[in-house]
Amino acid sequence: MKKLAVITLLLSTIAVFAQDSDPIVTDRPTQSAASTVVPLGTAIIEYGFIYESAGDITNTTLANIHARVGLLKFAELRITQNIQQVKSDATDTKVSGLSPITLGTKVHLATERGALPQTSIIGQVTLNNGKDEFRPGKAIPEVRLNFSNTLGEFWSLGYNVGMQFPENNTTTLYSAVLGYSFLPGWTAFAEPYGFFYEEDADHRFNAGLIYLVSNNFQVDISGGIGLSDISPDSFIGFGAAIGF
């Protein structure tokens, strides 16, 4: 009975949040960050779980926590923290712990006008903290441009380009996601994305479903495959997001 009461209270709270508000626009579960910013005075908390397999190594993100807060009319604050677990069957080892924290902002640049996309820019840095096995040698800056176009009543296109600057290897990233709203609240998506390193490239393909339960509550499921020698074999994930 106590569990039922808690669930009922949670659903009631979500319903209250959904009143008199626009639908939330999240960054998950795609690799393409949304071109929109969180409205001033509101926030979105996103959670995700990802299981990734690469030969005899599995990388599990037990919790991807992504908080976005509308600080200005045109800008949001972004904080990301992961709880990760890496397991190797070959060496019979397992490492679990906190990933480095990523801090940044997303700034609105342009509103969609005809063929001109809605545009924003993300500037963020992954700090030199977290569990030793996951900690980078130094803080890693990243800059990313986010674009989106409406392709009609049911179709949408989002795409990102950006660069990361780890210690000894500048990385260029890309993504392009095609979304199709096939029923009220339901969106299917397909997305190629990848990373170009100085001497190699990692290309992947991702697809999934998003369901907007209410204007302020979303759930999702997705999965994909690696397309390059250095890519993971496959990955699957699920998650949710809530707006305040």
Image: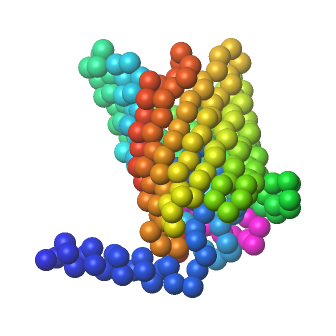
> Is residue 73 at least partly visible in the picture?
yes
- Residue 82 vertical placement versus 154 (above, below): above
In the rendered image, the residue lying farthest to the left is: 1
> Is residue 82 at least partly visible in the picture?
no
Helix, strand or loop: magenta stretch:
strand
Seen at 56% across and 30% down, the residue is 204
Total marks drawn? Answer: 0
Q: Which residues are magenta?
A: 67-75
Tell me: 140 left or right of 132. Answer: right
- Residue 61 in the image, given as x and y percentages of width and height: 41, 41
Seen at 51% across and 84% down, the residue is 19
- Residue 10 in the image, given as x and y percentages of width and height: 34, 75
Tell me: 85 left or right of 182. Answer: left
- Residue 214 vertical placement versus 193 (above, below): below
Seen at 60% across and 26% down, the residue is 203
Q: Quadrant of the N terminus?
A: bottom left
What is the quadrant of residue 175 in the picture?
Answer: top right
Decide whether residue 85 is among the magenta residues: no
Decide whether residue 69 is among the magenta residues: yes
- Residue 136 in the image, given as x and y percentages of width and height: 56, 32
